[in-house]
Image (cartoon, helix red, strand yellow):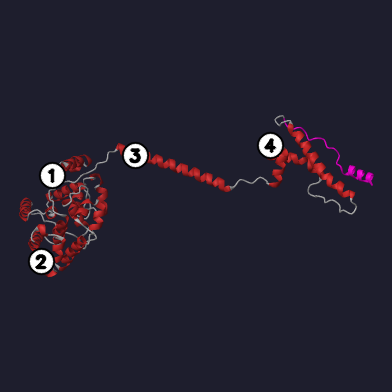
Amino acid sequence: MGEQTLGQEQSLTPTPIDPPPQPPSNTPAAAPVIETTTVANATIAHVSPTESELSNNNAPPPPTNPTAPPSKIPLRPRKIRKLSPDPAVSQPQLSSAAITEPPKPTSSSNSSSAAKSASRSTKTAQQQQQQQQQQQRALAVPRVVARSLSCEGEVEIALRYLRNSDPLLSPLIDIHQAPTFDNFHTPFLALTRSILYQQLAYKAGTSIYTRFISLCGGEAGVVPETVLALTPQQLRQIGVSGRKASYLHDLARKYQNGILSDSAIVNMDDKSLFTMLTMVNGIGSWSVHMFMIFSLHRPDVLPINDLGVRKGVQLLYNLEDLPRPSQMDQLCEKWRPYRSVASWYMWRFVEAKGTPSSAVAVATGASLQHHQQEQQQQQQQHPSQPQLLDPINTMFNMG
């Protein structure tokens, strides 16, 4: 029985196989020794259970692995050696790692995140470059910050700027007298006055305004409380229509409720002020522009809906048609930040052409006598020319 077992063991033991060929010169010399040891260990581990199973006749035959025959075992180290090029790692550890945890493929999310981070860095660099360019442009072109036109010397600064920015304005500046901004009515009084002059000729508006001031006890008495105390019947007796009476009461209520106030109006920027004032019934864009120029003395206001200013732009630039309000901003861009002063000269330019306008007189509160003298002088200079009715003369606010 022992001989049979021994013979069986010798028959099962594989014949010695020559060691695999030596690797190239760059492979370390210790690699073949590891391979031989690995093969021997694998052979002994495979033979030992077979020997014990043969000693027991009743034991079932050893299971065979059809996919991995003993003859292919020596080739495993060659496959394992390809998994890791690092010779410092021991070969048995590599084989166990290869069996238990196969190498994982590279995830596509890593590549996508890397691409996203690269694109973010590129965008950041571009934004920084754009900011640097904007800063350089801002330094190259100095920004003109305009003050109130009532400040000392500001009108002279505006005239020098307009001469340089638009040479066509230089003759007008030389011919006509420089504008003055010395009207300091309170915002509430100025807005009330603008409502009273709506859709009226200057003479009729001045008459109604004078009676309204007397009813309030003088200009100092024109306050929200006094206006709210006046009934529509009282206002109708002095020539104020029922619709204008409702406009006056709406303005006074917004003051009383805190939506508007003189201090808030003075400190608002142009855009916010335009939004807030056009919320009042009866106050449109034209009235707001006149109020901002002649009451608040804002330097950069362009009345795009004013017929006199539009007609002046047409004559100044020799345009075939009257410019539309939507075109005014683009045509008058070079006048910034003193478009209020340039608009003054557009009125004067149109008046010199025989189309008198009472815009300045109405907005600044000039006396009726002075305004009538101007009209008489213009009629004497141009007796045969027809006069175009400016919307300022016929309606103070159509917005």
Between 142 and 307, the one lying in front of the other is 142
Q: Amino acid at mark 1?
A: Ala
Q: Are marks 3 and 4 in contact (CB under 8 Å)?
A: no
Circle nearer the N terminus (1, 3): 3
* Alpha-carbon span between mark 4 and mark 2: 107 Å
Mark linked to residue 218:
none
Residue identified by numbered label 1: 178
List x then y, in percent, for residue 33.
77, 34
Residue identified by numbered label 2: 239
List x then y, in percent, for residue 272.
26, 54
Q: Amino acid at mark 3?
A: Gln
Q: Secondary structure at mark 4?
A: loop
Residue range of the region highlighted in magenta in the rendering: 1-24
Q: Indicate the quadrant where residue 358 lies.
A: bottom left
- Front disc: 4 or 2: 4
Q: Amino acid at mark 2?
A: Gly
| Rendered residue at 70%/44% (across/down) | 98
Residue identified by numbered label 3: 135
